[in-house]
Image (cartoon, grey):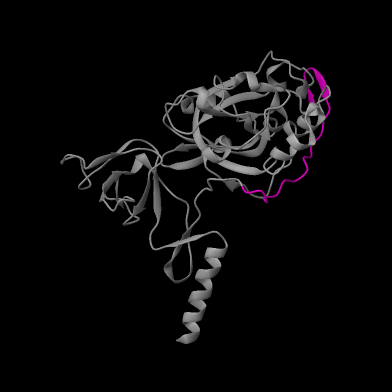
Amino acid sequence: MISLLRRLFALIVLALISGATVVSAQTATVIHNVNLRRDSSTDQAPIRLLKPPTKLQLLQTDPDDGYYNVRTAEGQEGWVWGKNVTIDLADVGPFGFIATVAPLSTIPDDWDRPTPTGGSMSGPSGSCPFAGKGNEKDSNHRKNRTDVPASFHDVTFDALATLAYPKAPKHRSDWSDDQLAIIEPHEGVAVRVVGFLVALRPQTGNEEETNCKFSKAAETDWHMALAGSAGKGEEKAVVVETTPRIRKKHPKWTPARLKDWVDSDQPVRISGWTFLDTEHRNHLNKYRQTLWEIHPILKIEVFKGGQWVNLDSLQ
C-alpha cells in the first residue's frame, strides 16, 4: 500500500513538473456565444450568456441531445450547445486522472530556436535563392525557411500579440546589437495559435525582395490577418503569412478553400515560426496591432463539425 501511494505521489509530481495540470474532469472552451441552460433543451430561459474563450469543466464527457453538462469557473452548473464549444485536447493519465496542457499565455525565453534552413525557389519567373534579393538576408532567410519542427508550442493569441519589440529602423540590417537582443529570445520559435481570420490577401502583383520581386500568384506570399476573437478588425490582428516555398508542398491551400473561415465566427489554428517583420511599421493600428507574425505558416487547420480539420484534408 505504501509503495502504491509513493508511486501515485511521484506520478503527480512528474505531471506538475512537466507543465501538466492534473484535474479530475475534462475541459471545454467556448468558441461561439452560447447560452448556459438549465437542462439539455431550449424549453427554459437561459441562465446566462457565455462568450469565447470562456473555459468550462465538463461534468460528463458524453453529450445529451447535443448539449454538454458543464460547470463554469464561478461554480455555475448547466448545459451548453455542443457545436458552440470545443473539447480541449486531453490525455488520460494514470489512475484515471486527465492531464491537460492549456496554451501558454507567454513565450518563454528558453524555447528552441533552430537556425533557419531552406533553398532556392523555382517558378514562372525563374529561380530565387534562399536569401532572396537585396541586403536583408537575415530577414529573408527567416521568411523563406522550409524546415518543419517535430512539434509546435501551443500559445494564446495574446502571447504573440503582446510580445515586446523596440522602436527601430525599418531595415534589420540597420539595427544595433542591443535592439536585436530584445527580439532574439522569441524569434524563430515553433508555435500554434487559435484565432479568427479577418482578412486574406494574396500578394499577387506585389514585388517583395524576399521573393526576388517576382509578382505572380505562385511566387508571392499571402498576408492573412488573425484576430483573437470573432468580430475584431484588422487593427487588432496579428499577420500570419504563407510563402510560395511552403505552399508548393500544400497544393490544397487556396483562398477558395479558406473563404468560409474569413470574416467568420469559426476559428482557425495556425502553426509556424515566429518572426518580427520590421518593414511594416506603417501598417500598425490599421492592418495589424504588432510587428510580430507567424511567418512562414507550416500548417493550417479549420474548425469544422466540432473538430479541427487539416486544410490539406478538408473535403
Q: Residue at x 43, y 27 (%)?
A: 264
Q: Which residues are magenta?
A: 108-129
Q: Position of residue 77 (x, y in %)?
A: 26, 52
Residue 205 falls left or right of residue 228:
right
Can you tell which quarter of the image residue 106 is in?
Answer: top right
Number of numbered discs overlaid on the protein picture: 0
Q: Residue furthest top?
A: 205
x, y (%) of residue 193? 55, 40
Farthest residue toward the left? 44
Q: Quadrant of residue 36?
A: top left
Q: Is residue 120 magenta?
A: yes
Residue 143 at x, y percent in the picture: 72, 31
Q: Nearer the viewer, residue 224 or 253?
A: 224
**Quarter of the figure that contains the N terminus:** bottom left
Question: In screen coordinates, is 7 left or right of 80?
Answer: right
- The residue depicted at 48 percent of the width and 34 percent of the height is 228
* Residue 198 can be seen, yes or no: no
Q: Is residue 5 magenta?
A: no
Q: Is residue 170 above or below residue 266?
A: above
Relative horizontal placement of residue 160, taking residue 130 as reference (left or right): left
**Residue 255 or 116: which is nearer the viewer?**
116
Residue placed most toward the observer, 6 or 163: 163
Going by the image, does 250 lie left or right of 137? left
Residue at the spot x=69%, y=15% of the render?
206
Q: Residue at x 55, y 44 (%)?
A: 155
Residue 109 visible somewhere in the drawing: yes
Q: Main secondary structure of the magenta part?
A: loop
Q: Viewer-proximal residue, 111 or 208? A: 111
